[in-house]
Amino acid sequence: MPERALYIYPMQKIEHILYSRFTILLLLCSILTLLNFPFIQVSYIQNGRTYIQEVSGYRCALGYIINHQKIAINIPIIICLSAVITCVLMYIINTKEEGYGFLLGLCGVISLLIFQITINYLFEYEGNTYKINCTAYYWACHLMLFIISSISYLNHNKKNKQGKILKNELHINIITQKGDE
């Protein structure tokens, strides 16, 4: 019997760490920090020389200049940034997790994917010989947002299975019937 208790304890500790609000806040603050580092790497050829310019996540959101061309504000990065800030504020102010972390994390993941598509399209549309690479910081933000949304979803489902259904939630039951009737 004591062997079983020793086996369960590490799993309970891991589960506690995963479902901890502090873990999600730590990941969200890490994303805000990673936006300071190079998000994309733009390489281009001019006068026979190859130039490489790195652009941080915040500079992508506010607009930047590459090869004397001003690139406008990028809306998907602003959406991702606002989703992360909203999620941080929600976890600090609100003491109950109501599933919004999942939606905001999903919004951040989708907006980063849209950013990658639009940035590649933008530089292909220019007709120049630009090559765009997303850096490891970009992919780390992607992974962290996916982890945040997954933890929030699992935590929300865990609370619903325990019978702790929260106020102001919309529950939809879909009833399906066979076509024989």
Image (spheres, rainbow, N blue to C red):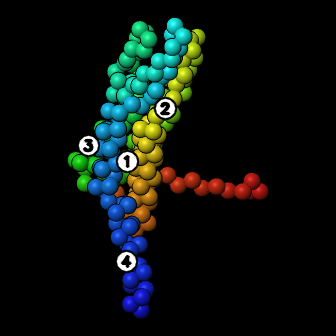
Kind of residue at badge 4: Tyr
Q: Tell me which amino acid carries mark 3.
A: Leu
Give the residue pinned by disc 1. Answer: 101
Bin the neighbour count of mark 2 within 10 Å (Cα to Cα): few under 14, some 14-19, many 20 and up.
Answer: some
Name the residue tied to disc 4.
9
Q: Is residue 165 left or right of residue 22?
A: right
The amino acid type, in three-letter code, at marker 2 is Cys
Report the residue marked by disc 2. Answer: 134
Q: Which residue extends farthest left? A: 93
SS of the residue under disc 2: strand
Q: For numbered disc 1, what is the local secondary structure?
A: helix
| Alpha carbons under labels 2 and 3: distance apart | 28 Å
Are there few (<14), some (14-19), or many (20+) residues within 10 Å of tag 3?
few
CA gap, disc 4 and disc 3: 32 Å
Residue 144 position (above or below residue 180): above
Q: Nearer the viewer, mark 2 or mark 4?
A: 2
Image height of 114 relative to 94, above or below:
above
Judge from the rendering whether residue 173 lies leftward or rightward of residue 2; answer left or right: right
Cα distance in 3D space between marks 3 and 1: 11 Å
Image marks 3 and 1: residues in contact by CB distance under 8 Å: no
**Residue 102 x/y as whole percent:** 42, 48
Which of label 4 and label 3 is nearer to you?
A: 4
Query: Which comes sooner in the sequence, label 4 or label 1?
Result: 4
Q: Would you identify the image quadrant in which residue 81 lies?
A: top left
Q: For marks 2 and 1, give the CA distance.
A: 25 Å
| Residue at (49% x, 32% y) in the render | 134
Which circle marks residue 89 in the picture? 3
Closer to the camera: disc 2 or disc 1? Answer: 2
Q: CA distance from mark 4 to mark 1?
A: 28 Å
